Amino acid sequence: MKVVAICALQNLVMHSRSNKRAVAEAGGVQLVLDLIGSGDMDTSIQAAMFIKLLFSKHTIQEYASSETVRAITAVIEKDLWATGTVHEEHLLALNTLFRNFPRLRAFEPATFSIPQLVTSLKTGSEATQEAALDALFLLRLAWSACPADVSRSQSNLRIIFTPYETTEVTLPSFLLATSFPKKIYKSIFRYMLLLH
């Protein structure tokens, strides 16, 4: 029943800014964040898709908060512990927040998402790996604008969770140990260009 209700809300907000605002003002953002953290995977996935739709534009930017990032990161971590993989929709919801609201990249929950994103690179499907790379790319873009302690923390976490091996070309060890589908290499090299 919850999935049906979320789908109905998705239809309401898909093309209407006023409906997005009405849902947010009625407390819909917190309700959806609670549903993302629910134990039911179908409900959680639909709630993540709803977050993606709700924050796809800057209409309700005052409702995009670090708590939203924290809730999605917690679900990603819970999925990794429970199943060893992450569903793509959770990462895409996180990407939507990072892409449309750059200020969220500088908060502590964004820093805490780095280990889960790197783990998603190693264990996920091609689409999950692509979404995780995009999130890391967006976080990397914000380092110059972040406060010094946040950018240092994010940079250190990236180094800790992405070990390097010294060869002719410096490649992260997960690239050397994992065979990725051909499509993912474009994103990997885009991310690596930002490392240097």
Image (tube, helix red, strand yellow):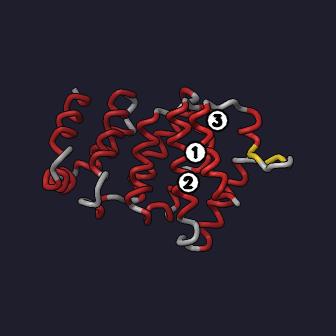
How packed mark 2 is, by other alpha carbons closer than 10 Å (few <14, some 14-19, many 20 or more), is many
In what quadrant of the picture does the C terminus appear? bottom right
User: What mark, if any, has residue 64 been given in the picture?
Assistant: none
Marks 1,2: beta carbons within 8 A: yes
**Closer to the observer: label 3 or label 2?**
2
152, above or below 91, in the image: below
| Residue at the far right in the pictured view | 167
Under circle 2, the secondary element is helix
Q: Earlier in the sequence, mark 3 or mark 2?
A: 3
Q: Earlier in the sequence, mark 1 or mark 2?
A: 2
**Closer to the observer: label 1 or label 2?**
1
Q: Does 54 sit left or right of 45 as displayed?
A: left
Task: Give the alpha-carbon distance from disc 1 to disc 3, as whole Å.
Answer: 14 Å
User: What mark, if any, has residue 187 been given in the picture?
Assistant: 1
Residue 142: x, y in percent?
53, 65
Q: Does 85 sit left or right of 192 as displayed?
A: left
Task: Give the alpha-carbon distance from disc 1 to disc 2, as whole Å.
Answer: 9 Å
How packed mark 3 is, by other alpha carbons closer than 10 Å (few <14, some 14-19, many 20 or more), is some
Q: Residue at x 43, y 52 (%)?
A: 69
Q: Does 77 sit left or right of 9 as displayed?
A: right
User: What mark, if any, has residue 137 been given in the picture?
Assistant: 2
Q: Amino acid at mark 3?
A: Lys
Q: Does 23 sit left or right of 82 as displayed?
A: left
32, above or below 141, in the image: above
> In this view of the protein, which residue sits in the foreground, 84 or 176?
176
Under circle 1, the secondary element is helix
In what quadrant of the picture does the N terminus appear? top left
Residue that badge 3 annotates: 122
Q: Residue at x 64, y 63 (%)?
A: 153
**Closer to the observer: label 1 or label 3?**
1
